[in-house]
Image (cartoon, coloured by chain):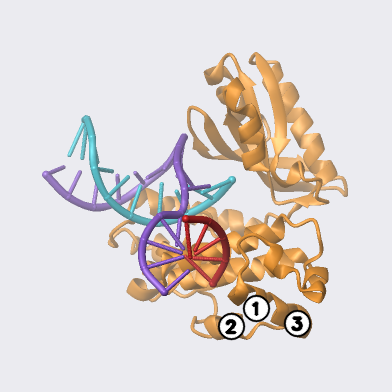
Chain colours: A orange, B purple, C cyan, D red
Amino acid sequence: MTNDEVAILLHEIGDMLDILGEDRFRVVSYHRAARAVEGLTADVGDLVRDGKLGDIPGVGTAIAEKITEYVTTGRLGYHEELKARFPPGVLDLLQVRGIGPKKVQILWQQLGITDLAGLEEAAKHHRLRRIKGFGEKTEANLLKAIETYRQGQARALIWDAAQLVDAIRAHLESRAPITRLEAAGSFRRMRETVGDVDILVTTRDVKAAMRAFTAFPAVKQVYSEGEIKSSVLVEYDAYTGGKRLLQVDLEILDADSWGAGLQYFT
DNA sequence: TAGACAGCGCATTCTC
DNA sequence: GAGAATGCGG
DNA sequence: GTCTA
């Protein structure tokens, strides 16, 4: 039982409660606890053994019980009960970028869409745009997102990610007056793998820096591009060979919020 | 045991 | 078309 | 659900 497994389980409970329309504070409680477990330095199994789960901020009696059950038995009844309330496939929809709990709920309840294939079909036949909150753009974006999802986006080795960060750094520095650049997130926490990369930057030319970022040659897709925050999908060479995809976010900070930003994103 | 609970940038859609 | 509202994601 | 007053 790794911390990450426990965290995933708690996140999933939060998502399921969210889709089911449960109280939002319960929902955020599960996500908050999940994040706390993610960021733990100690092994959650050890904490269970020592009765120290309560020391984790955001983990109270109810969630501590659930973690204990999972760590000691390898299963979590509550998670299984919740999961049983969804047709198989529905929860997969959450994996598509741009689809969150609210959209899953709508797709499922209003259109009877219970899996990826159903979603794709509906989008192709323009059945989504009739629903409130969905439009032409959303339809097109979802089709693209489904494709990207199918291509798969595994976690990257920290080493590969470091290479990528270096390449991006060089690119940015050659095109804008970068005063500071650092990777935050799991990268900074020295994990062996990262699910994405967050890059924090300070610069005297915000526009140029951002333009350079989204114009990085290996960028395959720009998810969003704003004045101070952008998100892209980048192709990189894996150490083990072959091309892989990784999401990279860039945020531009002003000098005085550097410390806070680093803290926040890590 | 009651009441508070993080805040924000971006994209898109909704509403007027 | 502008500004508000909503959802997503980090 | 969790935390604080």
Image mark for residue A78: 2
Q: State which chain disc 1 sits on.
A: A
Seen at 59% across and 23% down, the residue is A256
Q: Is residue A128 left or right of residue A100?
A: left
Q: Which x, y percent locates residue A119?
A: 45, 67
Q: Looking at the picture, does residue A26 appear above or below residue A170?
A: below
Type of the residue with mark 3 = Gly
Depth check, front residue: A237 or A40:
A40
The answer to which image quadrant residue A185 occupies is: top right
- Residue corresponding to mark 1: A66
Q: Quadrant of residue A80?
A: bottom right
Q: Are marks 1 and 3 in contact (CB under 8 Å)?
A: no
Examine the rendering and report whether any part of residue A102 can be seen: yes
Decide: is A62 above or below A207.
below
Q: Which residue is mark 3?
A: A74
Residue drawn at x 38%, y 48% is: A137
Instruction: Pinpoint the chain carrying mark 2.
Output: A
Q: How far from the left and from the top, in percent, is residue A1?
A: 79, 73
Q: Nearer the viewer, mark 1 or mark 3?
A: 1
Foreground residue among C3 and A90: C3
The amino acid marked with disc number 2 is Tyr
Q: Nearer the viewer, residue A240 or A82?
A: A82
Q: Amino acid at mark 1?
A: Lys
Q: Does residue A233 appear in the picture of this structure?
A: no
Is tag 1's residue or tag 2's residue first in the polypeptide sequence?
A: 1
* Mark 1–mark 2 CB contact (< 8 Å): yes
Q: Residues within 10 Å of mark 3 (few under 14, many from 20)?
A: few
Q: In which quarter of the view is residue A260 placed? A: top right
Q: Residue at point 72% right, 69% down?
A: A53
